[in-house]
Amino acid sequence: MNDPLYTSSRQRLVNISCFIIWIAYALIQTALLWWFDVDFPLAVNDGLISATIITLCCYVIANALNHYLPRKEKYLYVVVWGLVLAAISISASRWLLQYVIADKGYLDRVDLSLPLRFFINALLIAWIAIINILWNIQQEYKENEQRKADAERLAREAELYNLRQQLQPHFLFNSLNSIIALIGRKPDEARNMTFQLSDFLRGTLRKDDQQLIPLKDELDHLQLYLEIEKVRFGHRLQTQVSYDEECLKLLLPAMIMQPLVENAIKHGLYDTTDQVAISISCACRDHLLEIRIENPYDSESNKPRRGTGFGLRGVQRRLFLLFGRTDLLETKATTHIFTSIIKIPQR
């Protein structure tokens, strides 16, 4: 409620409401008095004085509630304020009228109408108080919802960051071990792998977990990862990347493919000494970017289950946090092929 824009609009509403009350009260009271055979000048004076006093009372309670939102157990205080202001308004009006109007008979009629005037003024003040309290409640609800949304966003960003951090150590340790192994036998390859690893990690650090990047950038970054893995596994690892040209501009979360490709290499190569081909294909249909990653596996010695393994769980959790859907990652297993399918909605 300390927002300057909110305070300005709120004060403007109070001013406009009080002006409308002043105009309406003066016109209605003047018209009613004139209707009941009161001389027009007396009716105008009474109407203007009464309207001015009640408008000031409404302005006072509106501004008081502008900075104070009473709790339910404190509403009685607001009622007391309203009754006191209503009493002040008719007392001040009666006091001023005796100096403006010299007609004793009219003043006696005013005294007889004081209970009715008190009731009307109390209703007006109550109406202004209710409007301000409802405004405050609505604004407080909006601020609570905004704070809740901000807290959820921060929690989501923290979880996404945590998922990213868990992805890196395993790959980094394996790459460093491979570099160490190559230093003695193949120093040139060890040096090239070090440069590739540096480029890969530098690109990883520049990317935000929630950043959506074009497919082309993701494939370029993935190619760095595949080159590092090919140094590790040599001729045993073969990769085939295919895509539709019109899909290259479509957006997807940064680093969403790497853990699935790492999972495919792990299950495709770690239990065999034969040459293994990893297939990556990208297509777009029905406002979705579909990425399919296939790797061979032995259904008898290795039985992957849907959603198992940190790579799959991490990707599924990221997709849920970013898109709010649980159906964007699908896995299929046949006798010799394991397939992971990601579907990225295009907003």
Image (spheres, grey):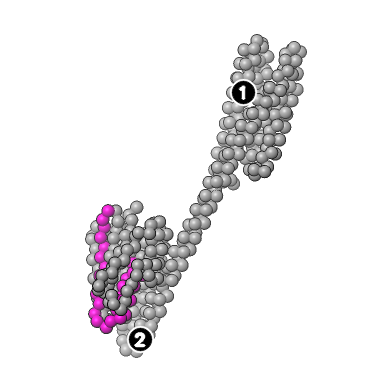
Residue at 24% x, 63% y is 243
| Mark sitting earlier along the chain (2/1) | 1
Residue 148 visible in the snapshot: yes
Q: Is residue 218 magenta?
A: no
70 relative position to 331: left or right: right
Q: Residues within 10 Å of mark 1 (few under 14, many from 20)?
A: many
Q: Is residue 344 above or below residue 309?
A: above
Q: Is residue 7 above or below residue 178?
A: above
Residue at disc 2, secondary structure: helix
Dividing the picture into quadrants, the one containing residue 72 is: top right
The N terminus, quarter of image: top right
- Residue at far bottom of view: 184
In the depicted view, which residue is nearer to us: 310 or 19?
310
The stretch of residues the image draws in magenta is 257-286
Q: Is residue 302 above or below residue 248?
A: below
**Residue 87 rendering spot, x and y as whole percentages:** 72, 28
Residue labelled with disc 2: 181
Residue at 64% x, 32% y is 126
Residue at 46% x, 67% y is 162
**Residue 146 rendering spot, x and y as whole percentages:** 52, 50
Residue labelled with disc 1: 25
Indicate the amino acid at tag 1: Tyr
Indicate the amino acid at tag 2: Ala
